[in-house]
Image (cartoon, rainbow, N blue to C red):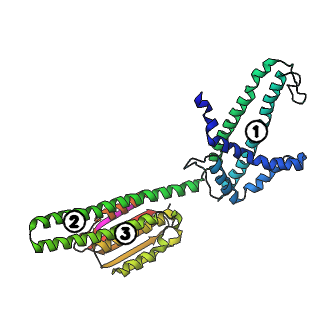
Amino acid sequence: MARLLRPLVRGTTYTRLMHLWVPMLIVSVWLYIDMSTWWLPAATLVPAGLIPAVRHGEGVQARLLLTPSEEDPGISVSPAATWRDRLRTVLWLEVRMALGGATAVSCVWLPVIAFQLAEIARGRVPDDIPLLSDAQPHWTYALLVPLPLIVLYGVVVGLGELVTAVARRLLGPSAAERLEALEARTEQLLERTRIARELHDSIGHALTVAVVQAGAARTAGDPEFTDRALAAIEETGRTALEDLERVLGVLQESERPVGSRPTLTDADRLLESARASGAKLDAEVSGPLESIPGPVSREGYRILQEALTNVLRHAGAVPVRVRIEVTGRLLVLEVRNPLTADIPGPGRGSGLRGIRERAALLGGRARTGPDEGDWQVQVELPLS
């Protein structure tokens, strides 16, 4: 019993009722002006629903009144971007008005019927209500008074659930919006994985070196060894701080919308940064970078960034050849630099794993390793 009565104390029940009443305000005003054209408000919803901003307004209102306590209600607040979105908005407006009409009729006539049943029980028979105008006064009609109110309760709760389900169906994200949300989620997971990997490699390495060196210096009793240990701790800590600043930069950048993240059209920025860091960089770009699909272009930028970072971190200021080639169905990224003595540093190996993971996520492939005296990173990503 308590479960059946729970919607009575739930605020969502009443906000949904308000949502259903809103269209009836316009209808009631129009019926007061001209009742003979009662259909005109519904007709005006067709051109109104074709306006892109209407979908935004309906989505905001539906979220606020139909699903006020849900973080992800499945209702879009984006303007209509396609004709399919516009037609869905038109259908939503018509359905909302129809359900609003049913709600308004129920909220007016069911209480009236309950009141008239009570009047019949008292001996007063209404003459303006069908079915009740022929009733014979009797006290037993008092037993029927709760019935219209129970029906009203069921109608209000049921129509509230129905309009919420319809809103999720007709105002829900389109295929393009779902793809964008999936892209944002994928980007977030990739960055989390990369951050975890970077923190494990850089901070873990720095703490390990600091603990080992400090313990050795404490037990050695040799001033020269202590100086060398402190210098190693200082250098390792400085490198770890640099890596931590880079990771924090990734965290701050993850708050930006996916569409505003850098793409391969911004590759010049990466190349200039590498040159400023001392790399002797020779770049070859062929094909229209602007034609690359957004997700591929964004991931390609990250792959190029990671490859150049690895060169600077492990090889230093060496000649670097970069090739970016866009063919009909393929994006090829290649970064080559001469093999040098291994330069230790935190994060060693994590960048290559990140490159392979990004390439695999997009259905591409990555080859890394020695090739004819050079260290090569070559990635192929499909464009469709």
Q: Residue at x 66, y 52 (%)?
A: 61
Of the pair 142 and 109, the residue shown nearer to us: 142
Determine whether, in the image, residue 317 is placed left or right of residue 72.
Answer: left
Q: Mark 2: which secondary structure?
A: helix
Disc 3 is placed on an element classified as: helix
**Residue type pointed to by label 2:** Ala
Give the residue type that dot 1 points to.
Answer: Ala
Badge 3: how crowded within 10 Å, few (<14), some, or many (20+)? few
Rendered view: 112 above or below 317: above
Disc 1 designates what residue?
Answer: 102
In the image, residue 50 lies in the stretch drawn in magenta? no
Secondary structure under tag 1 reads: helix
Identify the mark nearer the N-term, 1 or 2.
Answer: 1
Question: Can residue 171 be seen in this snapshot?
Answer: no
Q: Is residue 311 left or right of residue 99?
A: left
Residue 336 x/y as whole percent: 33, 73
**Mark before the other along the chain sequence, 1 or 3:** 1
Question: Where is the N terminus found, in terms of image quarters?
Answer: top right
Which span is picked out in magenta?
A: 364-369
Q: From the image, tell me which residue sits under label 3.
A: 245
Answer with mark 3 or mark 2, whichever residue precedes in sequence: 2
Identified at 45% across, 65% down, the residue is: 252
Q: Is residue 272 above or below residue 298?
A: below
Question: Can you give x and y, in whole percent of width and height, for residue 153 in the image?
Answer: 69, 33
Q: Main secondary structure of the magenta part?
A: strand
Label 2 belongs to which residue? Answer: 210
Q: Residue 362 in the image: x percent, y percent?
A: 44, 59
* Mark 1 surroundings within 10 Å by alpha-carbon count, few (fewer than 14), some (14 through 19), many (20 or more): some
Q: What distance separates the C-alpha of mark 1 from that of mark 3?
A: 60 Å
